[in-house]
């Protein structure tokens, strides 16, 4: 046999062996076993309530265990924008009439509430964006409403003054401190999707307010941030030119330290946690440049749509990219306390008097606006809780 013939025969033999090997490999493959090593869940979750109608965003637990929730008008059929969970149902709060917009006076009646917070002093506050669907807020409609928990009656309404409002303003979350100011101070995030983010500082007695950290790096979306949820890029919408565009959201989650001296906050479109002295926030002699320089970047915590603080100096943050809740200890250490595939977009955190951390899992990222008009949410949405053996940070 010639050298060429031998080489040709050897090549054919090698190819035949390789083909046989591949065929054998292909026929031997089996589906991945159900008990193969997999991602492990963390934390024992309880479902407190299941929502079968409109999507909730906010939850608060009072010091005697009452549960309040809100439903912003983002496209769902919202029968009432604030409710109380009791007797296995959600009832409009404080009543059905107040949950209807007053066309003659935007300051009266609720338009679209984004957040509810119990203040530790016998009231629950309702944060009305007056901006259904993230539209420009209706003039004179964005407001804070305090409801007395004993009488279930509105006892105070604070309309955001024009000097802190922009056509792009979307007031999102709030924290109270009754240790400063005649009747206390409230800090509110502007989580605009098209304009500057900010921290709005309002004096409760007078209703006077100022915008701080307006358009600062710490209150603005991270330009390099690309959210990934359930393994896919999330919050993708269509831009004015019809091309895909990721929705960006400014300062969102907010938490006040147990001593009231530090405010923690973060843009929704970011993985970083920021903090700043509340004394500097309230001081009109401190310039915006000085205030921005005083902000501390506390590093990455995960992407959050809600923050909370406890009485021991810890901060809790949702991590919507990883179906998780994380805890930052007073010394700066982080620990994941919840990681579960059912925690689909954790939104808003509230610590109850029972030592549980309550939060909503509302599948926000599955809304039709992010999926070419197809609503991928799978009802029910859930109000969940996990034991943390801690009390809420005091407000007074």
Image: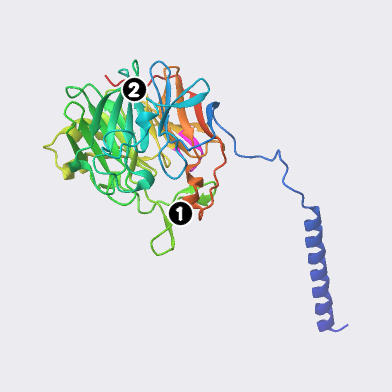
Closer to the camera: disc 2 or disc 1?
Answer: 1
Count up the numbered dots.
2
In the image, is residue 35 part of the stretch drawn in magenta?
A: no
Residue 17: percent from left, percent from top: 82, 66
Can residue 354 be seen by looking at this rendering? yes
- For the point 54% across and 43% down, the residue is 377
Q: Is mark 1 on a helix, strand or loop?
A: strand
Q: Which portion, as a residue range, is magenta?
A: 319-325
Q: What element carries label 2?
A: loop
Can residue 331 be seen by looking at this rendering? no
Q: In this view, does 238 lie above or below 152?
A: below
Residue 393 bears which disc, if any? 2
- For the point 17% across and 24% down, the residue is 181
Q: Is residue 367 above or below residue 107?
A: below
Residue closer to the observer: 391 or 206: 206
Q: Is residue 249 above or below residue 111?
A: below
Mark earlier in primary sequence (2, 1): 1
Give the left or right position of residue 234, taking residue 291 as reference.
right
Quarter occupied by residue 129: top left
Quadrant where the image shows the C terminus: top left
Q: Mark 1 points at which residue?
A: 236
Number of other residues with Cα within 10 Å of mark 2, as a class: few under 14, some 14 to 19, many 20 or more:
many
Quarter occupied by residue 64: top left
């Amino acid at each position: 046999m010639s050298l060429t013939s031998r080489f040709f025969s050897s090549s054919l033999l090698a190819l035949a062996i390789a083909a046989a090997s591949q065929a054998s490999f292909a026929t031997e493959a089996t589906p991945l076993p159900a008990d193969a090593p997999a991602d492990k869940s963390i934390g024992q979750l309880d479902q407190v309530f299941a929502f079968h109608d409109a999507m909730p965003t906010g939850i608060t637990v009072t010091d005697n265990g009452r549960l309040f929730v809100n439903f912003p008008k983002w496209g769902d059929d919202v029968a009432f924008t604030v409710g109380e969970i009791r007797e296995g149902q959600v009832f409009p709060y404080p009543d059905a009439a107040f949950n209807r917009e007053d066309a003659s006076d935007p300051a009266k009646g609720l338009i679209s509430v984004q957040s509810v917070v119990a203040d530790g002093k016998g009231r629950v506050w309702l944060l009305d964006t007056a901006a259904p669907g993230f539209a420009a807020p209706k003039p004179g409609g964005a407001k804070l409403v305090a409801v007395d928990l004993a009488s279930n009656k509105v006892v105070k309404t604070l309309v955001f003054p024009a000097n802190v409002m922009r056509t792009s303003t979307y007031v999102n979350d709030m924290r109270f401190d009754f240790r400063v100011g005649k009747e206390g101070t409230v800090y509110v995030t502007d989580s605009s999707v098209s304009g500057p983010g900010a921290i709005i500082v309002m004096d409760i007695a007078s209703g006077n307010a100022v915008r701080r950290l307006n358009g600062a790096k710490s209150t603005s979306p991270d330009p390099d941030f690309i959210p990934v949820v359930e393994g896919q890029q999330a919050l993708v919408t269509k831009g004015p030119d019809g091309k895909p565009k990721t929705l960006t959201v400014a300062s969102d989650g907010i938490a006040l330290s147990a001593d009231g001296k530090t405010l923690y906050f973060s843009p929704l479109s970011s993985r970083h946690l920021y903090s700043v002295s509340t004394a500097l926030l309230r001081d009109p002699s401190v310039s915006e440049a000085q205030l921005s320089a005083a902000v501390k970047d506390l590093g990455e915590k995960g992407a959050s749509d809600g923050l909370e603080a406890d009485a021991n100096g810890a901060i809790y943050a949702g991590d919507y990219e990883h179906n998780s809740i994380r805890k930052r200890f007073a010394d700066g250490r982080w620990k994941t306390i919840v990681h579960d595939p059912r925690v689909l977009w954790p939104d808003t955190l509230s610590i109850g008097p029972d030592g549980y951390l309550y939060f909503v899992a509302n599948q926000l990222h599955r809304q039709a606006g992010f999926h070419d008009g197809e609503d991928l949410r799978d009802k029910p949405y859930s109000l969940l809780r996990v034991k943390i053996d801690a009390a809420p940070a005091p407000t007074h």
